[in-house]
Amino acid sequence: MGASDNNIRSSVIISVYKDDTALRLILNSLLKQSFTDFEIIVSEDCQSACIKECVASFRKEIPDIMHLTQEDIGFRKNIALNRAIRAANNDHMIFIDGDCVPHPRFVEAHQQFAKPGLACTGRRLELGENISKKLRDSSADLSRLTNRFLYLLNIIPLLLDKAKNIESGIYSKFLHRNTKDKEIRILGCNFSCNKQDLEKINGFNEDYLAPGIGEDSDIDWRLVKSGVSINNVKFSAIQYHLFHPRAYSTSPENMALFEKTKQSGDYTCKHGLENMAS
């Protein structure tokens, strides 16, 4: 079992929407992490019976797992994220999307850099349709990806299955050491930061009511503008993104809101952890 060099505790926030099979894979992976001193919050942008049943099935192994729900009246992920931040008992937030399964050393990779003024972001392997189906059918197959030797043996099958970002699935201290100074931007499904830094910018902007930008580009811009540094943990904090048809593209409304935010120069959103609008 791994240990952190600091005394800051983490809350792992999982954003979910109706996909209980993927959530089961995520929770099983979180039970096998090298670092285990963290709480789990399932943040649901819905109130689905399948997610409720999935969380309940893990209560024996994760007694303190928190499950937050809200009415399903359109895309309101940022509202759900802010609710999870407010509910979190710890000072360090680690964010996972509900279709991204973490590597066994994922939490450890984020936890070791847990401190105010620093956000961390990793990357994810985009799995193809066939391998994603096999993972969903049997979580034991995840070892084919998390074991570095087996992963290298599976590169050809991954490519044939049209996986993307193959290099992002390799856990390697050497590769991390040699790329950690390369600048990368926050990926919303794989990042972490201190709670007080999120409070400083008033959390996620709840005016984003469509996928894209609001969960990563916007939060990245506002954190950096507030003085937070972005730490590259690629090849260390690894995720496996399960295939699903992409049902959206970045909305013009999101683009316009983000441009307006940048032009204003204000890193504090009006509708976030606190409603500051008159």
Image: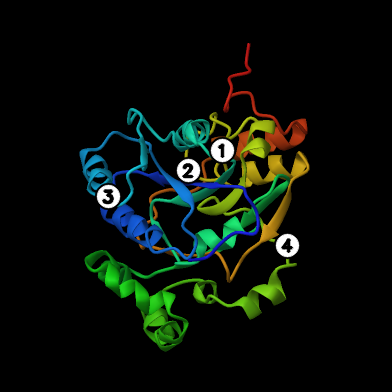
Specify the label residue 254 is tagged with.
1
Q: Are marks 4 and 3 in contact (CB under 8 Å)?
A: no
Asked if residue 45 lies left or right of residue 47, the reply is right
Give the Cα separation between the discs numbered 4 and 3. Answer: 38 Å
How crowded pointer 3 is (Cα within 10 Å; few <14, some 14-19, many 20+) is rated as some
Q: Quadrant of the C terminus?
A: top right
Label 2 sits on residue: 211
The nearer-to-camera label among 2 and 4 is 4
Q: Earlier in the sequence, mark 1 or mark 4?
A: 4
Q: How many marks?
A: 4
Q: Mark 4: which secondary structure?
A: loop
Q: Disc 2 residue type?
A: Pro
Give the Cα separation between the discs numbered 1 and 2. Answer: 8 Å
Label 4 sits on residue: 183
Q: Is residue 84 above or below residue 106?
A: above
Give the Cα separation between the discs numbered 3 and 1. Answer: 36 Å
Q: Mark 1: which secondary structure?
A: helix
Give percent across and percent down for residue 149.
Answer: 45, 87
Give percent across and percent down for residue 32.
Answer: 39, 64
Label 3 sits on residue: 58
Q: Residue at x 24, y 47 (%)?
A: 54
Q: Earlier in the sequence, mark 4 or mark 3?
A: 3
Q: Disc 1 residue type?
A: Asn
Give percent across and percent down for residue 248.
Answer: 43, 48
Q: Earlier in the sequence, mark 3 or mark 2?
A: 3
Q: Residue at x 52, y 30 (%)?
A: 86
Given residues 148 and 108, the one toward you in this image is 108
The nearer-to-camera label among 3 and 1 is 3
Q: Are marks 1 and 2 in contact (CB under 8 Å)?
A: no
